[in-house]
Amino acid sequence: MSHAAGTPENRTDRKVQVFGPDTIRRAVDLTDLIEPVAQVFADYSRGLGEAPISMFAPAGAQGDVHVKSAWMPGRTFFTIKVASWFTARAVGGKPAGSGFIAVHDATTGDLLAILQDEGHLTNIRTAAAGAVAARVLAREDATTVAVLGTGIQAYLQVLALCAVRPIETVLVWGRRDDAARALAETLATRDAELTVSVLSDAEEAVRRADVVITATASRQPIVRGSWLSPGQHVTAVGADDETKQELDPACFELADITVVDSLSETPKFAGDLRRAIEEGVLTGAGISGELGELLLGMKPGRHNAAQITIAKLIGLGIQDLAAAEVALPRLLAPRA
């Protein structure tokens, strides 16, 4: 089965296409990626393909670069993504993050396109993964979400959750009150049926929630295991390198189910998960499995309403591959 439409012929004679962020945003939205991301997670957990990760920090704490690539058998493309985050970039009012996805022909290796998305595809594929995780782990009757973080990923994770669960109430916490209020206003404007509140106390937000989302660059835990209660689900997406922490070790100790996107990669790069393992609170065997294994029924997901569940996600190149497979045919299609 083909995984991408509109594949051009004679690629070696074609000029490499470069698409900018505005064009890409118009072509692909969050909901377009939920099912493709679910599929690549399942394929990955079947042992199909590879998704290596490399990270380096040329600016130390002031900037880092993530290189994520992926290939899967039977796919039209393979992808290599460079995503960077530099505080110096934000001095002039630009987003701190930037990057691109290079899309290659999986048969010839030829470079087909550069998706210079300024992080859009990364943002929405990460949110799509959150939706997939919540769909298999959050209680079906979950109506209240606490989101810790105030950036674009916090915003998108809430929208993603709303796509798979009947969310009515959103509790926003952030280190900066103005940023938290701005996010709350944006969410309320996006969906008038949501009741959105800003809380100054992270513990209160967590204790009141059915689902907890963490989407920060914190280097110290912002959620304590002692705050969690039976039935809660946590989607943690911010601590994607060894220097960052969002959940303290007690969170993993209390969890009945801890799911990762990759058994080989996530424990190496997720700082909070890594700390729990180093402290002996969690062993590799204590990780319940990969998200794809739950989707395939290879490992059990939530099976009662009292379980505490955690999805610890660092983001994989297979998600970028799925995003490119959706985006590129739309970008190449003739305009009506």
Image: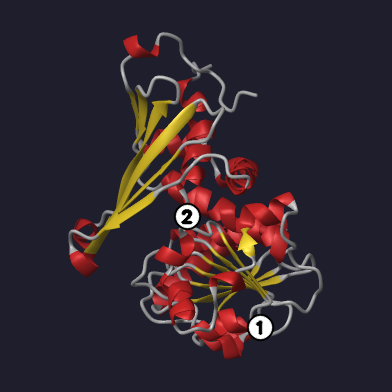
In this image, 31 relative to 328: left or right?
Answer: right
Residue closest to the eye, 25 or 188: 25
Residue 290, picture quadrant: bottom right
Secondary element at image label 1 = loop
Measured as percent of width and height from the top left, residue 309 is found at 66, 72
Q: Quadrant of the N terminus?
A: top right
* Res. 179 image quadrant: bottom left
**Where does label 1 land, which residue?**
208
- The mark closer to the camera, 1 or 2, is 2
Examine the rendered structure and indicate whether residue 153 appears above or below residue 78: below
Position in image of residue 150 (x %, y %): 45, 68
Please give the label number shown on residue 315: 2
| Coordinates of residue 185 in the picture (x, y in percent) | 52, 66
Which residue does the image show at 39% across and 78% down from the upper left?
A: 176
Mark sitting earlier along the chain (1/2): 1
Q: Can I make out residue 186 in this image? A: no
- Other-residue count near label 2 (Cα within 10 Å), few / some / many at <14 / 14–19 / ≥20: many
The amino acid beneath tag 1 is Arg
Q: Is residue 334 above or below residue 102?
A: above
Give, as a three-letter code, the residue at label 2: Gly
Q: Which of 219 and 173 is in front in this view?
A: 219
Relative to 259, residue 82 above or below = above
Q: Can residue 272 be seen in this view?
A: yes
- Residue 91's label in the rendered image is none
| Secondary structure state at the residue bearing disc 2 | loop
